[in-house]
């Protein structure tokens, strides 16, 4: 089989009656959710090491004033699929746990006369506190999944002790690209070289920066830890790993980190869609090219009905992007999520 295609949305929650209505694991109200297309290809690799997670209307947490959030993630594994699969199966549950334990929104004093703070500055202060709370929650999620990856066996893919020799423990690793949508903000937490790109008003806007070992600040950090970066076709930590941050990868943990970088982007009326993808796409397509292709699919006037191969323009866009990357010679697994920010269902 040359490649494997997964159309549609994985991990979609069903109610107890198995109806078509999505329900949150912690009781989020039924809300309109964005139309999403998601696809994974094994491509020219012998095995599939990517994993994706799509949870529209995941929950309605205190941190978002009990309004619903959507959760999307791409995980690109290395040295086996087990860490990416661990992230897919556990990261959203860890996030739910952390959100349930978080009640730290401080709205500020209602009286500005005593402390000479204007109402506007109070709102700004609240936004900053919410942002810092999100960072704290997500950092904790990355720390917890990283610790779990350390105790995952490379050979059998389960937690230890499993009966395998100890040298199999903690070998694998994965990127982790998490995107959370609120009604006002796009939150991205990234570790590794998967990437999130926003198309807004026809412009491609990167919402994450790849963690490559030759990024000046990443190179300086690696060298400060006593490591080095070798260059062949790609820059590699100790000549092994072509990224400077990852979940797991215990054998290189002295030099790499699982700490994510964050972006918080205010949602605007001209925002069109998001593309989240593993580097199997981005090695073959630029941000601009990917957005142009997806935009053409999403702007199709022809309605998608029961007679169409694809259930939505978002699915068509995700599928076309992966096929185009294959056509341009991508040698890697390719995973793409396209989130239509204009449409809801």
Image (tube, helix red, strand yellow):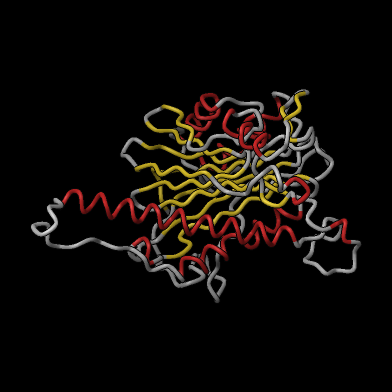
Residue 35 is situated, as x and y percent measured from the top left of the image, at 47, 49
Query: Image quadrant for the N terminus?
Result: top right
Question: Left or right: where does residue 50 sit relative to residue 272?
Answer: right
**37 to 21, vertically: above or below:** above
Residue nearest the viewer, comparing 254 with 345: 254
Dividing the picture into quadrants, the one containing residue 224 is: top right
Question: Left or right: where does residue 72 sit relative to residue 280?
Answer: left
Residue 116 is situated, as x and y percent measured from the top left of the image, at 12, 52
Question: Left or right: where does residue 232 sit relative to residue 125?
Answer: right
Residue 320 appears in the picture as rendered: no
**115 to 93, vertically: above or below:** above
Please tell me which residue is depicted at 66% across the width and 26% down the height of the picture: 284
Residue 311 is situated, as x and y percent measured from the top left of the image, at 55, 47
Please tell me which residue is depicted at 45% across the width and 39% down the height of the picture: 273
Residue nearest the viewer, comparing 12 with 113: 113
Residue nearest the viewer, comparing 83 with 308: 83
Query: Image quadrant for the C terminus?
Result: bottom left
Please tell me which residue is depicted at 48% across the width and 37% down the height of the picture: 207
Dividing the picture into quadrants, the one containing residue 163 is: bottom right
Residue 36 appears in the picture as rendered: yes
Residue nearest the viewer, comparing 134 with 293: 134
Dividing the picture into quadrants, the one containing residue 286 is: top right
């Amino acid at each position: 089989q040359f490649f494997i295609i997964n159309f549609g949305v994985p991990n979609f929650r069903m109610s107890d009656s198995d109806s078509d209505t999505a329900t949150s694991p912690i009781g989020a109200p039924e809300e309109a959710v964005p139309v999403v297309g998601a696809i994974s290809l094994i491509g020219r690799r012998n095995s599939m090491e990517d994993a994706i997670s799509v949870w529209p209307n995941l929950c309605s947490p205190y941190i978002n004033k009990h309004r619903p959030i959507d959760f999307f993630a791409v995980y690109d594994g290395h040295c086996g699929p087990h860490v990416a699969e661990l992230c897919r199966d556990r990261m959203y549950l860890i996030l739910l746990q952390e959100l349930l334990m978080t009640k730290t929104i401080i709205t500020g004093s209602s009286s500005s006369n005593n402390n000479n703070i204007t109402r506007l500055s109070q709102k700004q202060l609240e936004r900053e506190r919410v942002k810092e709370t999100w960072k704290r929650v997500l950092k904790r999620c990355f720390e917890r999944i990283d610790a779990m990856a350390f105790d995952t066996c490379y050979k059998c893919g389960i937690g230890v002790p499993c009966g395998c020799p100890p040298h199999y423990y903690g070998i694998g690793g994965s990127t982790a690209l998490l995107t959370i949508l609120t009604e006002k903000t796009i939150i991205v937490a990234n570790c590794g070289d998967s990437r999130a790109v926003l198309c807004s008003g026809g412009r491609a806007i990167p919402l994450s920066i790849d963690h490559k070992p030759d990024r000046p600040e990443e190179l300086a950090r690696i060298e400060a830890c006593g490591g080095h970066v070798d260059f062949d076709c790609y820059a590699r930590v100790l000549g092994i790993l072509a990224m400077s941050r990852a979940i797991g990868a215990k054998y290189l943990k002295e030099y790499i980190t699982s700490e994510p970088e964050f972006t918080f982007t205010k949602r605007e009326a001209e925002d069109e869609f998001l593309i989240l993808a593993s580097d199997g796409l981005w090695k073959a397509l630029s941000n601009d090219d990917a957005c142009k292709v997806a935009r053409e699919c999403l702007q199709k006037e022809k309605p998608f009905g029961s007679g169409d191969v694809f259930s939505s323009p978002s699915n068509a866009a995700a599928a076309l992007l992966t096929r185009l990357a294959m056509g341009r010679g991508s040698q890697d697994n390719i995973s793409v999520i396209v989130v239509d920010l204009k449409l809801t269902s």
